[in-house]
Amino acid sequence: MPLAGTPGSHRDRLPLSRVHHVALITADYARARRFYLEVMDAEILHETWRAERHSHKLDLRLPGGIQIELFSFPSPPPRPSYPEACGLRHLALATPDLETCVALLESRGERPEPIRLDEITGARFTFLADPDGTPIEFYEEAAGASE
C-alpha cells in the first residue's frame, strides 16, 4: 500500500492551513523578552504570569504574522544543540531581503553567522541564536514566493 502523499495514495489529507505558533522555553525570561521585542521586532499579544507554575507565558507576533509562545520555567535543562539532538532543529523565517535583516540585526548588537548558500535550492540564508541558543534561520525568498 502506498504511503500517504506518494503517487497512488488515495488517503484523505489533513485539512491544515499553516503553522499556528512556535513555542519556546527560556531560562531567563527578561533577557528573552527583550531579545524578541527589541531584536526580532515582535509585538506583545498577551502576557501572563502563571503563579501555580512559577512561569511566564508571553504570546508574541513577529513581522509577517508569525506567532511565538515564550514560556519561562524554573531551571529548564539547556538546549542540546552541539551535537544536534532529535526534535525541532530551528525556526526558519522567510525574508525577501537578507542583507537588510543582517544589517538590522548587527545594528542591534547581534552577530548573525556569515551568509551561506543552500546547495539544493540556491537560496541564501544565515542563522542567529536567541538567548537560549535556539537557532533562528533567516531564509531569503524571492518576493511573492510564499503566496
Image (tube, helix red, strand yellow):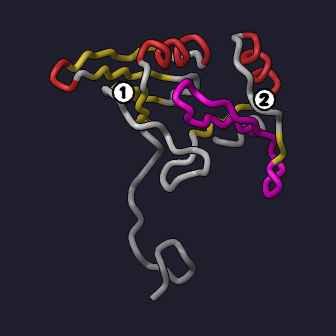
| Residue 123, numbered circle | none
Left or right, residue 55 beside residue 99? left
Residue 141 x %, y %? 74, 39
Which residue in the structure is indicated by mark 2? 98
Q: Quadrant of residue 124?
A: top right
* CA gap, disc 1 and disc 2: 28 Å
Tell me which amino acid carries mark 1.
Answer: Phe
Residue 71 x %, y %? 36, 27
Q: Quadrant of residue 21?
A: top left
Tell me which amino acid carries mark 2.
Answer: Leu
In the rendered image, residue 126 lying in the magenta stretch gets the answer: yes
Question: Measuring 58% from the left and 15% from the top, which residue is drawn there?
Answer: 41
Q: Quadrant of the N terminus?
A: bottom left
Question: Measuring 83% from the left and 41% from the top, which residue is drawn there?
Answer: 116
**Callout 2 secondary element:** helix
Q: Which residues are magenta?
A: 118-141
| Residue 71, numbered circle | 1
Q: Is residue 143 above or below residue 50?
A: below
Q: Nearer the viewer, residue 103 or 83?
A: 83
Mark 1 or 2: in front is 1
Left or right, residue 130 beside residue 96? left
- Number of disc labels: 2
Q: Is residue 143 above or below residue 52?
A: below
Q: Earlier in the sequence, mark 1 or mark 2?
A: 1
Q: Nearer the viewer, residue 2 or 48?
A: 48
